[in-house]
Amino acid sequence: MEVSRSPPKPLTSVSTSVTETINGFHEFKISAYSLTKGLGVGKFVSSETFMIGGYTWAVYFYPDGKNPEDNSSYVSLFIALASEGADVRALFELTLVDQSGGGKHKVHSHFGRALESGPYTLKYRGSMWGYKRFFKKSSLETSDYLKDNSLLVRCRVGVVKSCTEGQKNYNIPVPVSNLGQQFAKLLESGKGCDVTFEVDGETFAAHKLVLAARSPVFRAQLFGPLRDRNTDRIEIEDMESPIFKDFLFTNVPSGIFSWGATPVVEFTHPG
């Protein structure tokens, strides 16, 4: 009679595309604003470069504007890619801080809203994102954004990065067991010993559970039918103390000594 077997299930592999933004902030203070006026259209003052998402960035402030057609009536503000890179996708935010404490900041941001065309892409070093007409100069110079002849710009950059994650196989090395050595050290320390053996005039302290786990003879003696008798102190006859010590300290199979002999143990309970 043939037994029908169902075909083996095909193996299925899994992968996931993960896209995230690596965010960072930078504050750029423009002091002595009045001295930057007259610098010229297309001329800028820049922040120190800063690192976000593995790329270097800088803030460019154009006190007389970037566009000649505006006749220096607007200030321009941009974030620029200052390191080598191609097709760097990022989200940007430029904030002119209200320095009166009123919290009415002027904010232009990609964050927190849906972008029809997705993140902005910078093609090469020197590529910029920002506004040629960020603020009308006449309004800026009478506003709360200007304090003590200084402006404060806060920028935020979120570099968009994608990767594909597959199934992860973990290879955890298992160390060689040294349980026998650990038990030997415990025995030598004398900590937690709960049984004493008298062998050939010599006394040995040991642990009942360890002995029971290693030897069916001790398991019966310590936890078998005779367990109600005194098992805290046990006298062993017809055995030399070195042999018994060898059993206690040698990592050998249960019931066999290191030279292959099988012990035959007779117990005598004092009293």
Image (cartoon, rainbow, N blue to C red):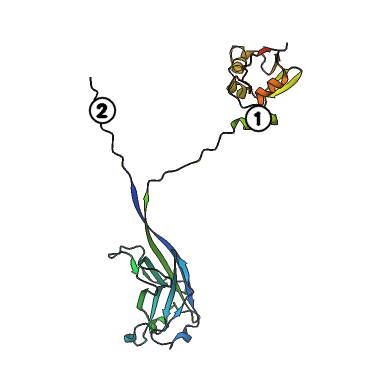
Residue 35 % position (x, y): 48, 86
Residue 220 % position (x, y): 59, 15
Mark 2 vs mark 1, foreground winner is 2
Amino acid type, mark 2: Arg
Counting labels gives: 2
Examine the image and state in which quarter residue 141 appears: bottom left
Residue 12 % position (x, y): 31, 42
| CA distance for labels 2 and 1 | 53 Å
Say whether disc 2 or disc 1 marks the residue closer to the N-terminus.
2
Give the camera-side residue of 39 and 53.
53
Asked whether, in this view, residue 184 is left or right of residue 44, the answer is: right
Examine the image and state in which quarter residue 118 appears: bottom left
Residue that label 2 marks: 5
Q: Residues within 10 Å of mark 1 (few under 14, many from 20)?
A: some
Most distant residue in the front direction? 259
| Disc marking residue 270 | none
Q: Is residue 129 above or below residue 21?
A: below
Residue that label 1 marks: 184
Helix, strand or loop status at disc 2: loop
Give the camera-side residue of 98 and 176.
176
Residue 252 % position (x, y): 60, 25
Can residue 178 be seen here? Answer: yes
Q: Residue at x 63, y 30 (%)?
A: 183
Give the camera-side residue of 166 and 194.
166
Amino acid type, mark 1: Ala
Can residue 105 be seen here? Answer: no
Q: Is residue 203 above or below residue 96?
A: above
Helix, strand or loop status at disc 1: helix
